[in-house]
Amino acid sequence: MQNGTRLAAVDLGSNSFRLEIGRFEGGQIHRVQYLKETVRLGSGLDAERNLTSVAMQRGWDCLARFGERLADFKRGQVCAVATQTLREARNRDAFLARAHEILGFPIDVISGREEARLIYQGVAHLLPQSDEKRLVVDIGGRSTELILGRAFDARVVESYRVGSVTLSMKHFSTGQFTAHAFQMAEIAAKAVLDEALNAYRRDAWEVAYGSSGTIGAVGDALTAAGWPAGSVTREGLDWLLARLLKAQSADRLQLDGIREDRRAVIGGGVSVLRAVFDLLGIDKMQAAQGALRHGVLYDLLDREQTQTDVRSATVQRLVDKFETDTAQAQRVGKVACHLFNQLQGGPATAGPGSNLRKLDWAAQLHEIGCRISHSDYHKHGAYILDNIDALGFALPELHRLSLLVLGHRGKLRKLEVDFEDTLFVRQLLCLRLAVILCHARRDPDLKGMRLAADPDADHRLVLACRPGWAEAFPQSAHLLREEVAAWQKTPWTLQLAGC
């Protein structure tokens, strides 16, 4: 990435939407602009976990303003992520389709553990380099992330479904602050966070850091009242609770450092924070400058190279875990990428989000279901990818990989995909052809073989073979003819020449 390149991260949180714009210089990202709007998307989930039209409109209006600021950015310079509320929302696709159109860039819904990993990266990159063992806590609107790490390595990551918005809606819905309400809210938070006791025990970390909204708001309030800046202590939390109880309600709260947009959720946020302090034995928590949006920006840099792309490491872990035939996977990947390069008219880019890299990942993973079933391994492999927490991957990205794995063999009509998506169709065809050509689990003879789009017919792809190839490899030729028949039941046509 060239010095001076602008990058942007959009964080669609449950309480606020944020836009961070930075400039890459000398391996670091320096802030250019930061925008934040209180959208309260999380409070717009109804009893059936559908976003209300009012909540969606608030989100769309905010993204329209962000989109105007990002109008001259290129696709690879922007990454937008959505968190717990859109993980939960049953009608998220309706919201995201319109949001994508308004913002001008795709929005990836990320898993809780991926959110935790990115939060840690954001915190770590804005802290001085150190070998200390860290606990990072991020209390969001509808989830709380806990991470153990050292330097830039997030070693234990988890996301818990409790946050400032969820507790405020349940225990402070009328805005009243009572001792009983705080007691019940803390009990509810501890019930969710109890399972963190073993993984995040006190001897596993040396310094605790707090990231993002709730900790920032609490820290600001304590600093304004004369407490030491940059940290939150047990004593400070006790003092803040006393002030909230004295105010009796969010509307009557007069406390420097607590912004107007934070009042409605401060009760729930303080309750979660007190529960975390109690459960994990925290006496003091440092306020961190880094957050999810910063982790997203640095992740854009990491994706520049295969060796720093965490998704490549995740794929390798899955390959190892499910003990796939690595030689066959690499063989299929090599052939699939070779055909894809031919079809695209030259070597595909190796930059962020490389389509070639994703095709290779699908090849590496296409047999991970074999540990479960030999005959239906493609179905089990697809299920694994659709239901696993895979660090580095957004949920739609994983689903696209699962469709490639599901579709690499068998009938095509089982795939619920848009066959007008030319890129996906080309990736799928190249993977299927590679599996066929490598069916004997040895390197195929590709001399004189070429895959190309027919310039005279839309949706027609032509695989040409050298004279005599079909006679030399009759089984492969037979399987290719069956593949032609499979594509006849789709809007696409595969034509063989000399095969």
Image: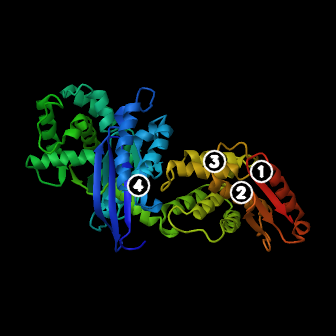
- Dividing the picture into quadrants, the one containing residue 471 is bottom right
Residue 265 location (% of width, % of height): 25, 36
Q: Earlier in the sequence, mark 3 or mark 4?
A: 4
* Residue at disc 1, secondary structure: helix
Q: Kindly tell me whether residue 12 is visible in this rendering.
A: no
Q: Is residue 259 visible?
A: yes
Residue nearest the viewer, comparing 117 with 105: 105
In the image, residue 301 above or below residue 180: below
Distance of label 2 from label 4 (alpha carbons): 34 Å
Q: Residue furthest left?
A: 226
CA separation, marks 3 and 1?
21 Å
Foreground: disc 2 or disc 4: 2
Residue type indicated by callout 4: Arg
Task: Report which residue position mark 3 lands on.
Answer: 382
| Front disc: 2 or 3 | 2
Q: Residue furthest front?
A: 456
Q: Residues within 10 Å of mark 3 (few under 14, many from 20)?
A: many
Mark with earlier residue (2, 4): 4
> What amino acid does circle 3 point to?
Ala
What's the residue at 80%, 73% (across, down)? Answer: 448
**Quadrant of the snapshot with the N terminus:** bottom left
Contact (Cβ within 8 Å) of mark 1 with mark 2: yes
**Element type at mark 3:** helix
Which of these two is toward me, 72 or 461? 72
Q: Residue at x 23, y 40 (%)?
A: 262
Residue with the mark numbered 2? 429
Query: As rendered, which of 48 and 161 lies closer to the eye?
Result: 48
Query: Residue 117's mark?
Result: 4
At 22% from the left and 49% from the top, the residue drawn is 216
N-terminal of the two: label 1 or label 2?
Answer: 2
